[in-house]
Image (cartoon, grey):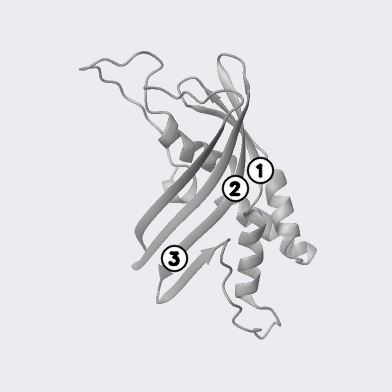
Amino acid sequence: LKFNFENGKGYDYEMTTNMDQSIMGQDIQMDMTVYYSMDVTKDNGTSKTIASTIDRFKMKMGAMGFNLDIDTDKPMPGMGLTEDGKDPVKMMNTLFGAIKGQRFTMKVNAEGKVEDVTGFEEMAIKIVDSLGLEEGEKEKMREQFSKQFNGEQIKSQFERAWYIFPNKEVKVGDSWDKNTEVPGEMGGS
């Protein structure tokens, strides 16, 4: 057993995250599923380059009596304009719809440890630009997006799935340790 993606082949991944937490006495539940298509574009013997596309994004969240159900394949109906003339649901549909189809690249070593992730800065710019915001709002939105979706988050997410076996044959009775961290506000590091 080992990380063994083959050069020139494609792989589809569905990653689901379920979180139940309490923040300042408020219970928050969030389920998020992201569907990825990945193509191994290069293998130099020590690392693989994997071009990844986000095919679909789903999120359900409940907090303080407010429920949100987002699916890029099934946009939510608008809720009408607020005082400032905007429809927040339409804005969320646009935001998450812009995530669909975005691409990034990972370099992964033979053990499945993600060494590098590129493309998230460009992704943030494209997604925020799609919202049609004023320049000041764009910068705030890019900053917020980058806190939630960034290369370190993706590294951590994929390492938990791929970086589990040692880079050697595993026999009955063998044991090993692997440590990963969850970066950012959710992980506390």
Where's residue 68, x and y in %? 48, 70
Please tell me which of labels 1 and 2 falls first in the chain. 2
For the point 66% across and 43% down, the residue is 103
Q: Is residue 24 above or below residue 87?
A: above
Q: CA distance from mark 1 to mark 3?
A: 25 Å
Q: Residues within 10 Å of mark 2 (few under 14, many from 20)?
A: some
For the point 67% across and 57% down, the residue is 98
Report the residue marked by disc 1. 103
Looking at the image, do the residues carrying marks 1 and 2 touch, with CB atoms under 8 Å apart? yes
For the point 78% across and 67% down, the residue is 134
Would you say 105 lies left or right of 131 here?
Answer: left
The amino acid marked with disc number 3 is: Met
Q: Is residue 9 above or below residue 129?
A: above
Report the residue marked by disc 3. 61
- Which SS class for mark 1? strand
Where's residue 27, x and y in %? 34, 66
Q: In terms of depth relative to the viewer, which is nearer, 79 or 151?
A: 79
Say which of marks 3 and 2 sits in front. 2
Report the residue marked by disc 2. 54
The amino acid marked with disc number 1 is: Arg
Q: In terms of depth relative to the viewer, which is nearer, 98 or 122?
A: 98
The amino acid marked with disc number 2 is: Ile
- Which SS class for mark 2? strand
Would you say 122 lies left or right of 172 here?
Answer: right
Total marks shown come to 3
Picture quarter with the N terminus: top left
Would you say 82 lies left or right of 1 here?
Answer: right
